[in-house]
Image (cartoon, rainbow, N blue to C red):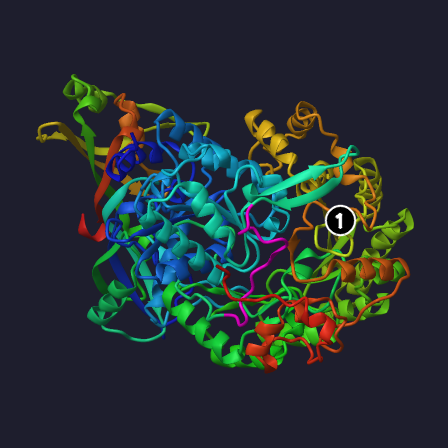
């Protein structure tokens, strides 16, 4: 994206819950455009034949997952203070989106997508879905030198994408896994794939993203 | 035992991750209305018998949803047909059809209102009832089941669906839906039996209760008589209209996912004064009523603020004929300049004024194509269908469109008009080629022509209601001529599957006996008939055989002018004598101009004389005419009877 020095760049952190879990990345982009339009915020548009709003979304979240740590960057034509922008966005957000932080970003910073390194997830499972030998399965998975899996007809190695995986002290009747997966461009670990590798049906799990780790904060 | 909303929600949570586009099934979208279930005495479920993506783009349901939810003692929620993957999952999980807002089972509502804008939704409507656990046949329903109400343009021939629907809403729903809801509310309090409710409903202007009528047939299968079985049952049933268009809805629900139309729909006019003889909408939505520019602009501002949509469609049957079109377009471009708003103006007349309007409206942005609908390509056919434009006019307008920066010109044609010959179809190919040649002369190889060729079905309540349809062989011959000729660089051709046209024709021209065919077809697996990948022509043929009915009786038979038609007891306001006269005029090649200029006495004015008297002036676009005394007797009382 060409940087226009007269524009103002903001990073918005937001949660994505409820039915918004089923809004895919492309539709989420539309959701943000409409939210900004409802907020009556001076959103910047690209130039050219068919102008599109200058909105960037961080690492895409798989359909069905919830999150408390999504990131979007938006470009405005006017200089708003982050608290003002935040309050405008809060009023205009649709059900399932809650803005939790707004900060101003230098327009010269690299693109959001290139900053994101990894993503942390919490996976909750009903007790009946919890394999009895989960600890052993997790150990075996982490011990494996390579984990060949197939996605869209192409084989890849899942193992290097798993940076951390542990069983968290579970509530009675519910199990919880925590994992940190690579989320770099071209190297993205998907929590569903990890669950499948553990022999767990991902459609039975509630996957929640808790953090996106940016390059500068590692 | 009906499932509780909590249980439905719980089961749903498990299904959603396993189906395509789960965002169709969650509800909870921005601007949905959730009212207190226990404290609201009258509950309506508005259902569209196709998927969410289409249903959410339906303006009629949005109007009813808004109107009902404004009433303190009523609530309206929504339901749509689940796509087959979701339907299978729902049936496996024992999940009934439920409302998106509060997840109540459909059967818990007082009224299930089904939108029937076109006929290919009929099996889906049955499927919805089945998913809801509601008996399919009206006569099998008792006091505990919701009232099944259906409305929409297809309801102007309600007979094929008469076995399944308790009451039809004929005509405009804004006021009618509230009358029906009040009637059901009072009946609930009264504790009377269901037949009592049906008779009370029949007293409401525009409501048709099919079980209160008996249809007799002749040996040859034609209708002999239509008899009212109760004093409350009007004969004929006159369509409902609103004298003035009420303020448009503005709080449109914004889906979580991309749907068919992601935009604000804004109706600027209802009705049409052009009188194209094939056009059912143009006949059944008379008289023409317009919204003031100020109201449209204010509503648009409000709708954009509520939804954040980046697109607006001004809806009408003929945008160019809206009296204040230039003023509207000027005001819109002034008020919304620089707001990255896409505006569309459908159904423009074939003249340079339309190009001027689109220029003003879209500024320098050139999106998609420019659409013109000549409908036919020879002067003879255009006179026959009463759409008199000259070929020169089409070409000069096309020249201007290309010169003003559009690269694609969409041309809409229809094949199968009465008395059409292959040379008339050949002319469609010739005209499309001539338009492309004009485009290439102006902008070179970038010029494109997209010819959309649909197939004519003679619709009830039109001057062509007596004529036969082409057979599939005839249609295929015409289509293959076009396919042979309109190929190569610059052309795109689209057409309708002749088998789908047959289904549309049977269902739109059928009588009450088609109920057995629809039921049989659904039982044999027919659903989503409007979707090519699901449409099963063989199933429909089997269903006709099983019901001992001959499909060609409905479609390939020229009906005598004096035949009693299955929909004759439904009065759209236009006199049958006017339709037959107009049909005869078509055979003579006589045309009628815009009826704003001169009244052709279609029957609307005398039919709604008292309404017109109460709303004088420019509310209707009909010219002022003195009603002769004989016409006054045709006028009906427009208060709710009973």
Q: How many marks?
A: 1
Q: Tell me the magenta residue range.
A: B230-245
Foreground of the two, B25 or A46: B25
Residue B232 on the magenta span: yes
Residue A156 on the magenta span: no
Which residue is label 1 attached to?
B456
Foreground of the two, B394 or B622: B622
Using the rendered image of the protein, determine whether residue A56 is visible from the camera's viewpoint: yes
Q: Residues within 10 Å of mark 1 (few under 14, many from 20)?
A: many
| Residue B371 at x, y percent in the picture | 68, 62
Q: Could you tell me which residue is drawn at 21 percent across and 39 percent down?
A: A121
Q: Could you tell me which residue is drawn at 29 percent across and 42 percent down?
A: A183
Q: Chain of mark 1?
A: B
Image: B354 above or below A206: below
Left or right, B200 with respect to A103, comes to right
| Residue B85 occupies quadrant | top left
Quadrant the N terminus of chain B occupies: top left
| Residue B642 at x, y percent in the picture | 48, 59
| Residue A164 at x, y percent in the picture | 19, 33
Q: Could you tell me which residue is drawn at 74 percent across and 41 percent down?
A: B224
| Residue B436 at x, y percent in the picture | 79, 59
């Amino acid at each position: 994206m060409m940087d226009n020095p007269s524009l103002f760049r903001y990073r918005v952190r937001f949660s994505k819950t409820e039915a918004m879990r089923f809004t895919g990345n492309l539709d989420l982009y539309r959701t943000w455009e409409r939210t900004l339009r409802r907020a009556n915020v001076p959103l910047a548009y690209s130039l050219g034949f068919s102008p599109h709003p200058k909105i960037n979304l961080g690492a895409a979240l798989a359909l069905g997952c919830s999150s408390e740590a999504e990131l979007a960057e938006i470009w405005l034509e006017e200089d708003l203070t982050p608290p003002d922008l935040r309050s405008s966005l809060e009023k205009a957000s649709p059900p399932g989106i809650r803005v939790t932080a707004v900060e101003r970003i230098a327009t010269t910073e690299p693109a959001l997508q290139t900053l994101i390194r990894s993503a942390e997830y919490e996976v909750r499972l009903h007790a009946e879905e919890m394999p009895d030998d989960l600890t052993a399965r997790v150990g075996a998975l982490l011990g494996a030198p390579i984990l060949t899996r197939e996605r869209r007809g192409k084989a890849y190695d899942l193992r290097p994408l798993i940076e951390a995986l542990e069983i968290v002290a579970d509530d009675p009747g519910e199990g919880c896994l925590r994992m940190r997966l690579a989320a770099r461009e071209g190297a993205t670990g998907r929590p569903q794939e990890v669950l499948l590798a553990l022999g767990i049906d991902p459609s039975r799990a509630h996957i929640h993203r808790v953090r996106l780790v940016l390059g500068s904060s590692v | 035992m009906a499932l509780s909303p909590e249980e439905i929600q719980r089961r749903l949570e498990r299904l959603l991750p396993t189906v395509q586009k789960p965002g169709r099934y969650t509800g909870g979208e921005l601007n949905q209305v959730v009212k207190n279930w226990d404290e609201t005495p009258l509950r309506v479920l508005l259902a569209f018998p196709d998927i969410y993506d289409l249903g959410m783009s339906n303006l009629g349901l949005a109007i009813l949803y808004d109107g009902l939810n404004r009433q303190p003692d009523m609530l309206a929620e929504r339901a749509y047909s689940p796509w087959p993957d979701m339907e299978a999952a729902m049936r496996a999980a024992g999940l009934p059809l439920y409302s998106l807002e509060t997840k109540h089972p459909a059967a818990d509502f007082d009224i299930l209102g089904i939108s029937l804008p076109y006929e290919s939704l009929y099996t889906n409507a049955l499927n919805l009832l089945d998913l809801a656990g509601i008996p399919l046949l009206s006569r099998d329903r008792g006091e505990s089941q919701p009232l099944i109400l259906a409305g929409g343009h297809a309801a102007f021939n309600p007979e094929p669906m008469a076995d399944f629907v308790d009451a039809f809403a004929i005509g405009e729903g804004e006021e009618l839906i509230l009358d029906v809801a009040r009637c059901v509310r009072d009946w609930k309090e009264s504790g009377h039996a269901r037949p009592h409710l049906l008779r009370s409903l029949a007293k409401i202007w525009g409501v048709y209760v099919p079980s209160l009528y008996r249809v007799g047939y002749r040996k040859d299968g034609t209708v002999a008589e239509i008899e009212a079985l109760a004093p409350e049952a009007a004969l004929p049933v006159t369509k409902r209209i609103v004298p003035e268009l009420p303020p448009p809805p503005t709080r449109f629900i914004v889906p979580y996912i991309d749907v068919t139309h992601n935009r604000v729909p804004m109706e600027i006019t209802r009705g049409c004064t052009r009188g194209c003889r094939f056009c059912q909408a143009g006949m059944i939505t008379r008289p023409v009523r317009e919204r003031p520019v100020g109201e449209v602009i204010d509503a648009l501002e409000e709708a954009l603020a509520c939804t954040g949509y980046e697109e607006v469609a001004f809806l009408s049957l003929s945008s160019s004929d809206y009296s204040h079109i230039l003023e509207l377009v000027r005001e819109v471009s002034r008020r919304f300049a620089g707001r990255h708003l896409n505006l569309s103006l459908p159904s423009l007349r074939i003249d340079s004024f339309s190009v001027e309007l689109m220029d003003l409206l879209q500024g320098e942005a050139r999106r998609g194509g420019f659409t013109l609908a000549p409908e036919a390509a020879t002067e003879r056919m255009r006179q026959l269908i009463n759409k008199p434009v000259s070929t020169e006019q089409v070409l000069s307008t096309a020249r201007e469109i290309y010169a003003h920066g559009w690269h694609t010109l969409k041309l809409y044609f229809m094949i199968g008009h009465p008395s059409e010959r292959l040379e008339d179809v050949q002319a469609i190919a010739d005209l499309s080629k001539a338009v492309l040649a004009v485009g290439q002369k102006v902008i070179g190889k970038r010029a494109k022509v997209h010819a959309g060729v649909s197939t004519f079905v003679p619709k009830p309540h039109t001057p062509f209601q007596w004529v036969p349809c082409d057979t599939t062989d005839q249609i295929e011959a015409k289509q293959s001529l076009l396919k042979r000729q309109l190929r190569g660089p610059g052309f795109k051709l689209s057409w309708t599957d002749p088998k789908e046209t047959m289904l549309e024709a049977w269902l739109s021209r059928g009588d009450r006996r088609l109920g057995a065919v629809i039921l049989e077809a659904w039982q044999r697996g027919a659903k989503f008939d409007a979707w090519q990948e699901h449409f099963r022509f063989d199933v429909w043929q089997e269903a006709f055989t099983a019901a001992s009915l001959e499909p060609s009786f409905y479609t390939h038979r020229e009906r005598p002018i004096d035949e009693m038609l299955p929909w004759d007891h439904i009065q759209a306001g236009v006199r049958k004598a006017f339709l037959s006269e107009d049909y005869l005029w078509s055979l003579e090649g006589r045309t009628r101009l815009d009826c704003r200029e001169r009244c052709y006495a279609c029957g609307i004015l005398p039919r709604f004389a008292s309404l017109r008297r109460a709303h004088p002036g420019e509310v209707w676009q009909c010219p002022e005419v003195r009603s002769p005394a004989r016409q006054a007797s045709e006028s009906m009382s427009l208060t709710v009877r009973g």
